[in-house]
Image (tube, rainbow, N blue to C red):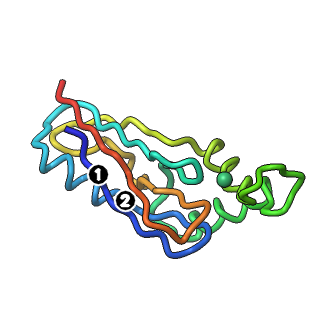
Amino acid sequence: MTKTLNVRSRSKTELIDITEDIRRIIAEEGIKDGLCFIYVPHTTAGITINEGADPAVKRDILVALSKLVPFEGDYQHLEGNSAAHIKATLVGTSHCILIEEGKPLLGTWQSIYFCEFDGPRHRRVLVKTISS
Ligand code: ZN
């Protein structure tokens, strides 16, 4: 069964740590070894895995993405949020994580982030676990 994680962003752009939510879902599903597929069903949000120890990394990622893809630009999309669409495409909308011994196989410093690029909004993250 696919589980839905509800995420509430509070800023225009924001990285929200969902690592503990993913750990909880894997534990609830009782998966010991397998895969965890995480999917964001939105066009202006994404998912990434990166450092969770120093909060400055989240900030630096957002600042660098905004330099790469400025909010104002030569865009034709009438909704006026092309930068958010482009950032979502750059970051991607899914990740697949290995599960071993009932836990996501993440590196010591890795966290899983929901990436908001057009907030604040209520968002959904879909999570599917598969036992191997
Ligand atoms: Zn749009």
Residue type at the position of mark 1: Thr
Which residue is the site of mark 1? 4
Q: Is residue 42 left or right of residue 105?
A: right
Residue 33 or residue 128, whichever sits in front: 128
Indicate whether 78 appears above or below 53: above
Q: What percent of the width, then of the height, locates residue 26?
A: 20, 46
Residue located 61% across and 67% down the image: 13
Q: What percent of the width, then of the height, locates residue 110?
A: 43, 52
Toward the top, the furthest residue is: 132
**Label 1's element?**
strand
Instruction: Name the image quarter holding residue 30.
Output: top left
Indicate whether 22 appears above or below 32: below
For residue 18, which numbered disc appears in the image? 2
Residue 119: tell me if it is visible. Answer: yes
Toward the bottom, the furthest residue is: 10
The quarter of the picture where the N terminus appears is top left
Task: Please name which of the two marks, 1 or 2, marks the residue nearer to the observer.
Answer: 1
Q: Is residue 34 left or right of residue 18?
A: left
Residue type at the position of mark 2: Ile
Q: Is residue 118 left or right of residue 46?
A: right
* First in residue order: circle 1 vs circle 2: 1
Q: What percent of the width, then of the height, locates residue 22?
A: 28, 52
**Label 2's element?**
loop
Residue located 13% across and 36% down the image: 32
Q: Residues within 10 Å of mark 2 (few under 14, many from 20)?
A: some
Residue 13 or residue 82, whichever sits in front: 82
Residue located 46% across and 56% down the image: 113
